[in-house]
Image: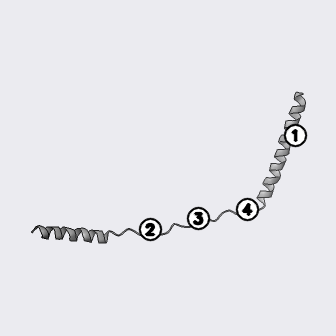
Amino acid sequence: MLNKYIFLIACFLGSIAAVAQPVVVPPPTPPPPGLPIDGGVLVLLVLGLLFGFYKIYVFTEKKKRSV
C-alpha cells in the first residue's frame, strides 16, 4: 500500500516538473543607433580655442596688474 502512494506522489511530482518548463524570453531589442558626429564638432573646437585664448589673456593681464 505504501509503495502505491509513493508511486502516485512520484507520478504527480514528475508531471509537474515536466510541465514547468522555463519561459523562453525573447532576445532584447538592439540599442538605438549612435548619433552622427558632423560639423558641430568643428564649431565646438573653435569655441574651445577662443575660450582658452581668452582665459590666457585674462590671466596674463591679472599678472601684469598685480606687479
In three-dimensional space, the C-alpha distance between marks 2 and 3, rounded to whole angstroms, equals 17 Å
In the shown orientation, is residue 20 left or right of residue 34? left
- The residue pinned by badge 1 equals 57
Q: Name the residue type under label 1.
A: Tyr
| Rendered view: 53 above or below 25 | above
Q: Earlier in the sequence, mark 1 or mark 2?
A: 2
Q: Amino acid at mark 3?
A: Pro
| Amino acid bearing label 2 | Val
In the displayed image of the protein, which residue is found farthest to the top? 67
Please give left or right for residue 51 compared with residue 3 in the image: right
Q: What residue is shown with label 3?
A: 31
Q: Residue at x 57, y 67 (%)?
A: 30
Who comes first in sequence, dot 4 or dot 1? 4
Residue 35: where, in percent of width, then height?
68, 62
Relative placement, left or right, of 28 versus 39 is left
Of labels 4 and 2, earlier in sequence is: 2
